[in-house]
Image (cartoon, rainbow, N blue to C red):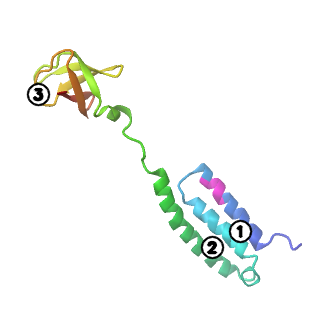
Amino acid sequence: MHGILPWHVWIIIGILFIIIEILDPAFFFVALGFGAILTGLLSLLPFVEASIPLQIIIFAILSFVAFLLTRRLGKKFLANTGGETNVFALKGKEAHVTEMIPADGKGRVKVDSEEWVAIAEDKGEIAIGAKVVVLDIDGNKLVVRKDS
């Protein structure tokens, strides 16, 4: 044995990059990890093993290609696939008026099991018990329209 060989170094660097990617999932270090591991495997070839500058060039090219491929995959994987969350998830939901909404004033509506301050979209009056639909959120108030 000659001690540590260049391909050992590339494989170790690749594994370290992949571990870093696990700790910081940004789809950046995984590309460097793939580039280093593939460079390590290619450096087993006799004509690549003898040239460290060639190995560095191979690493740069493979990492760049892996970066382009994993970036596209990462964007698709990390894309927002869910709907609205938190208070914005109330948009489009049906509610019931629990306190009259006066013209140009505030009343209260119940959405699911929560009660909210509400204002009418058309600034008209909405009576207690009326069905309304949540159109928007304005600060801590729901903007509602009487359901037809």
Residue type (three-letter) at the residue carrying disc 2 = Phe
Magenta extent: 17-21
The quadrant of the rendering that contains the N terminus is bottom right
Instruction: Left or right? Give the position of 76 relative to 135.
Output: right
The residue under label 2 is: 59
Instruction: Left or right? Give the position of 100 relative to 57.
Output: left
Q: Nearer the viewer, residue 21 or 131?
A: 131
**Rendered position, 10 above or below 121:** below
Task: Using the rendered view, name the quadrant where residue 40 is placed.
Answer: bottom right
Q: Position of residue 141 (x, y in %)?
A: 25, 27
Task: Using the rendered view, name the quadrant where residue 36 is placed.
Answer: bottom right
The residue under label 1 is: 10
Residue 19 colored in magenta in the image:
yes
Badge 2, how many Cα within 10 Å: few under 14, some, many 20+?
many
Q: Position of residue 97 (x, y in %)?
A: 22, 18
Callouts 2 and 1 close, C-beta under 8 Å = yes
Q: Nearer the viewer, residue 103 or 82?
A: 82
Q: State which tag comes first along the sequence, 2 or 3.
A: 2
Instruction: Left or right? Give the position of 130 relative to 75.
Output: left
The residue under label 3 is: 123
